[in-house]
Amino acid sequence: MTLSTKPLSGMRQRLPHEFRVEKYVVETLSLSSLNAGFEEYDCPLIEPLSLFAAKSGGELVGRQSYNFVDRGKREVILRPEVTPSLARMIAAQGELQLPVRWFSSPLCYRYERPQRGRVREFVQFNLDILGSENLAAELEVILVLQDIMKSFNAPSSIYRIGWSSRRFMAEALSRCGVEPESAPGVFSAIDKRDKMKEDAWYTFLLGECGGDSDVADRVLSLVSVKSPSSKWLIDLMAGSAAFEEVERFNELLLSSGIESAEFSPGVVRGLDYYTGIVFELVDTGGENNRSLCGGGRYDNLVGLFGNKKISGVGFGLGVLTLTLFLETYGLIPVSVKEASAADVYIAVSSPDFVSSAARLALSLRKEGIRVMMDVSGKKMNKQFSEATRYGITSVVTAGADGAMYKMKNIDDGSVFTGTLDELIGRLK
RNA sequence: GUGGGUGUAGUUCAGUUGGUAGAGCCCCUGAUUGUGGUUCAGGUGGUCGCCGGUUCAAGCCCGGUCACCCACCCCA
């Protein structure tokens, strides 16, 4: 029987030219994080199933997880996300100077049917601040998010950071007349709004509101609100602490010059553990359907591991969805896509010269010059083709020791002849 | 889990109302050339996803199956 040449469905496999792009994306994310004083951490790939059962959401654990029973009869799971592990790490520290600002780029797993932007094994960049209940923490993570987009040269016209608040929405729906038992249904209806035609959506919403059109109309008004300074909204939310928080956060964003953030009551976010401000980053063009990034405030996650009450705020960002987004808008630099594998290629004209080519390669590499030595043993014209294929523009032909070196520039055809030192000077 | 689409050369794809398989790119060889690229000539390469059915005859029609893609669900 012959083995399949394909990896398991949805599993990650990257050829060098693909991996180069992914690596560029992850490294750019890390740079922005380090720039803002965040530190990198790591945590287990395999976790007890119970870690996610409590707060991540039934769908994620029940139907979309890679879980199994290990040899010790433990129910375990390949992590679908990393925030609960982070919360545990924080809870386990006896003395930790708070707040902490941490980031990570873990591989995560979800048993879903693969499609554009969705695979089963993916890198999800995470950035969190734990131990600060101050709204400045929300502001800070959104600042970093915007800085990330800027570092990829994404103009603010092609993406939008929509934000809202779970606490505020729960209260607002109640004030709109939504019965507590209808609230989850109304929430999910709100979440679907962008995907349905306006009138079909209204009919759907009306159903979730128990057929009460007054209630449905108010919910429609609520999700149509574009700013917390809306007169209608202020009247509705008079005396609400959650709404005051929304107003304050709006002020903070405006006065900090975050032009891409937009108050959007329709933003809900799927994970169950979010409690306060939530936000997501989407492509305004529609080429990339899904949110690139989602995050928010979670008050009760660290508390699961004992009596410490530590609040956190952060976001997860899909490296694959982000990469698709960058490719859609031509934002992957050519230098990344077509990087040369070396600075110079050493062509070997005869087997007699392999050892002198090797000595030359070592001398150049010692100087920090990237050198690719021919190992094909093919004819000289093929060796030049090889160099071209790797994007290398300089080719040195190895000859007898003691002779002068001849180096040809493939771009302009010029030939340079000189001693080893002169060659090094030329290449550095 | 639900719905739609596609499976033909290494790759991207064409293939007419059923009549024994084609192109570009890649690759290989030779020529040309400033040892590369450029240009020219030639060449390798396919159980048409798999199994069955209809037919004198199936890449094409029918049934099944598998794989992949896209959308929904959910989410990064």
Image: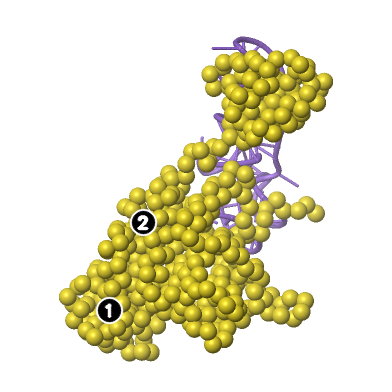
Chain colours: A yellow, B purple
Give above or below for B42 relative to A120: above
Question: Does mark 2 fall on the same chain as mark 1?
Answer: yes
Label at residue A386:
none
Chain name for mark 1: A
In the image, is A134 to the left or to the right of A355? left
Residue type at numbered disc 2:
Tyr
- Which image quadrant for residue B25? top right
Relative depth, front residue between A351 and A191: A351
x, y percentage for residue A91? 57, 79
Residue type at numbered disc 1:
Glu
Instruction: Tell me the quarter of the image containing the C terminus of chain A.
Output: top right
Count of marks, rendered view: 2
x, y percentage for residue A406? 66, 17
Q: Residues within 10 Å of mark 1 (few under 14, many from 20)?
A: some
x, y percentage for residue A338? 54, 37
Q: Residues within 10 Å of mark 2 (few under 14, many from 20)?
A: many
x, y percentage for residue A98? 50, 74
- The residue pinned by badge 2 equals A159
The residue shown at (57%, 45%) is A20
In the image, is A360 to the left or to the right of A171? right
The residue shown at (47%, 41%) is A333
SS of the residue under disc 2: strand
- The residue pinned by badge 1 equals A244
The residue shown at (27%, 63%) is A255
Give above or below for A37 relative to B58: below
The residue shown at (27%, 84%) is A240
